[in-house]
Structure formats: structure tokens, C-alpha cells
Amino acid sequence: MTYIVTDNCIKCKYTDCVEVCPVDCFYEGENMLVIHPDECIDCGVCEPECPADAISPDTESGLEKWLEINTKFADIWPNITLKKDELPEAKEFDGKENKLEAGLFSEEPGEGD
């Protein structure tokens, strides 16, 4: 099992989770974060820290595409270990559904640390 970042992180990108991760397995995109599934130690510390409730165990059904997205982009985006401000539009987009399908996901990398 690993934890993965899902749809609700898009256009929010709260980083409370990266601060508590003991193995620094978060990677930063332009408008969301991902977890590297091969680095995650399944401790679960990050899940309750996410204000957007966007982190889930990969054992939940229907998250296969998110496991693929996390795996793909963790290999190409920069590592992030320090808390930053959320995106300016975070409150507006927190809780909106189907952000990926709506074309709101950016494949562009973030800045990292």
C-alpha cells in the first residue's frame, strides 16, 4: 500500500502534508502535489494533515488513475519538503469535483525546495 494525492489537490496545493512526511516523498507540480509510491513508507501521517482531504491510500477503489499520475509525475517533478503558501485560488477550488476531467490539471513542474 502507498498513499496518493488525488483530484482535490488540483488548484489548491496545500503543503501541510510535506512538512510531516518522514521520508520526503512529495513532489511539486505547478498546481498540485504527488507522492512517489516507491518512496512512501505507508505511515499515513500526511493524510490527516491535508486540509483538502486529497490524500488517500491506494487501496481505496477507483483510484488507479491517481496511482498512475502520482507515479509518473513523481519521477519528473522536483521534490518538496518545506511548507509553502497554498495557491491563491485554493479556497475557491477546494471541494470542486472532477478537476482532472475539467482540464484543470497542469503537467508543468513546480519549483520544489
Image (cartoon, rainbow, N blue to C red):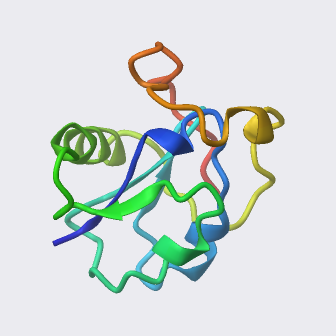
Q: Which residue: 52% across, 33% down?
A: 109
Which image quadrant: the C terminus? Answer: bottom right
Q: Position of residue 90 (x, y in %)?
A: 74, 40
Quarter where residue 20 is shown? bottom right
Q: Residue furthest top?
A: 103
The percent position of residue 28, horizontal first and vertical second, equals 53, 47
> Which percent across, then down, holds residue 15?
65, 60
Relative side of 86 to 22, left or right? right
Residue at the image point whose x is 23% and y is 69% from the top: 2
Query: Looking at the image, which is closer to me, 55 or 22?
Result: 55
| Residue 58 x %, y % | 21, 61
Number of labels in the image equals 0
Q: Is residue 60 left or right of residue 88?
A: left
Q: Quadrant of the N terminus?
A: bottom left
Q: Nearer the viewer, residue 106 or 7?
A: 7
Q: Is residue 28 above or below residue 26?
A: above
Residue 69: image quadrant is top left
Seen at 34% across and 48% down, the residue is 74
Give me the residue at 35% from left, 39% from top.
76
- Camera-side residue: 13 or 63? 63
Q: Is residue 95 left or right of residue 1?
A: right
Q: From this view, report whether residue 33 is shown above or below residue 83.
A: above
Q: Is residue 44 left or right of residue 48?
A: left
